[in-house]
Amino acid sequence: MQTIDNFNFAGKKAIVRVDFNVPLNKETGAVSDDTRIRGALPTIKKILADGGAVILMSHMGRPKQNPDPKFSLKQILSTVEERLGQKIQFAEDCANADAQAAALKAGEVLLLENLRFYEEEEGKPRGEFASDEAKKEAKKALKEKQKEFAQKLASYADVYVNDAFGTAHRAHASTAVIADYFSDENKMFGFLINSELKAMDKVLTDAKAPFTAIMGGAKVSDKIMIIENLLDRVQNLIIGGGMTYTFIKAQGGKIGNSLCEDDKLELALGILEKAKIKGVNVYIPTDAVNADKFAADANTCISKTNETPDGWMGLDIADETIAKFSEVIANSKTVLWNGPMGVFEMDKFAKGTSAVAHAVAKATANGAFTLIGGGDSVAAINKNKLADKVSYVSTGGGAMLEYMEGKVLPGIAAIRGK
């Protein structure tokens, strides 16, 4: 497999799939978080430093038409220029940028308009269909057009570089199909994807014990695959967030109005049984901060998680649980964190998630390898200004989850193989 470190881009044009699907300020239209843009800079700079030219391609949002000004990448052009430190050309139509790509000189950068303006990018037909059969036929026809779209993008360059880990779990034209039009010597991962894979492989195949997985969030169903895959690897499993109460109710606890997946109670008991068989310690919150409504101005009370008062719902972990979780994390040599401990967006219910963030940072300082992934966990680390205090913060929420579940990601397999 070709690597970006060993490749000389001199005199070559590289088309680079980046993830510039960044949040914009609703009032000003300015980029409100440039993390993904900054993440792509090392790859772009390497190509330019070698004497190559760069064609950047990305999606933004979920546009339903072509064009859609709300999702135009033109909005982020000035931010990318500022971060890169040079002017960037812009192609108004990603599928008709032949002339601009051909004229691109060494050291120059061209940003293509939003790939998803074309339904060929995702391979999903838009619009209404008279029947399921009609939709099926449209999807089949679109698959052929997707190949043509990918081939067109490939024609702009000599080399393909995928550096968008956040979309690597999608079999889209720009993330997987395009790789078919480049030889093995002329397709590779960028620095960002390489670092993502290195961090995740370290956790999956080379984790030092004790290995603690912290799984938070609302639903057991969202995390069941990753939990089951990790049960063979971890010594400790910490459960938090809304899914706490599915486990509590499954064991006969009283949960008031707390979030619960009633159809997943047996699943929760199954996880606990598997963990017991494998010798994994499972830590479920024992006390919680409850609210009388789901709102920032709600009244609160503290109770045991299995004694939640009627009419109340658990929205954060409380002090007893914080102390226990912090102790387990402090004694860990490897930590994977995915999902918050409560509704941390509301200050009243942010204490538990913040405490876990600080515990993970402290464990890192004591020599543990710590990997943070998933939008909410990353947001919590950033909110507490601890991103530089942990080992690695993943840029790919869904992609990271699927990789950790043991699934083959199309964007990775297209270059690395199965």
Image (cartoon, grey):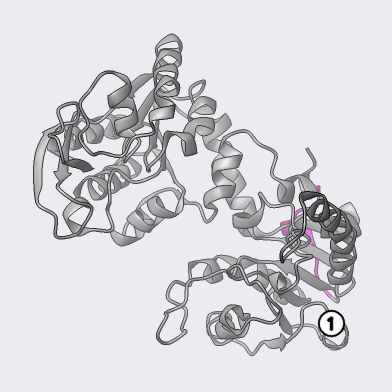
Give the quarter of the image for residue 154: bottom right
In this picture, residue 7 sits left or right of residue 218: right
Give the quarter of the image for residue 161: bottom right
Which residue occupies the foreground of this view, 204 or 414?
A: 414
Reply above or below: 94 against 285. below
Reply above or below: 120 against 412. below
Disc 1 is placed on an element classified as loop
Which residue occupies the foreground of this view, 166 or 48?
A: 166
Residue under pointer 1: 96
Residue 85 location, x and y as percent?
57, 85
For the point 16% across and 41% down, the residue is 312
* Magenta stretch: includes residue 7: yes
For the point 9% across and 52% down, the residue is 299
Dot 1 crowding, Cα within 10 Å, few <14, some 14–19, many 20+: some
Q: Please count the marks in the image.
A: 1
Residue 287 location, x and y as percent?
16, 32
Say what amino acid the circle numbered 1 marks: Asn
For the point 86% across and 54% down, the residue is 137
Secondary structure character of the magenta stretch overall: loop
Residue 415 location, x and y as percent?
79, 49
Magenta-drawn segment? 1-10
Residue 141 location, x and y as percent?
88, 58
In this picture, residue 164 sits left or right of residue 307: right
Which residue occupies the foreground of this view, 82 or 220?
A: 220
In this picture, residue 162 sits left or right of residue 165: right
Kindly tell me whether residue 386 is visible in this rendering. yes
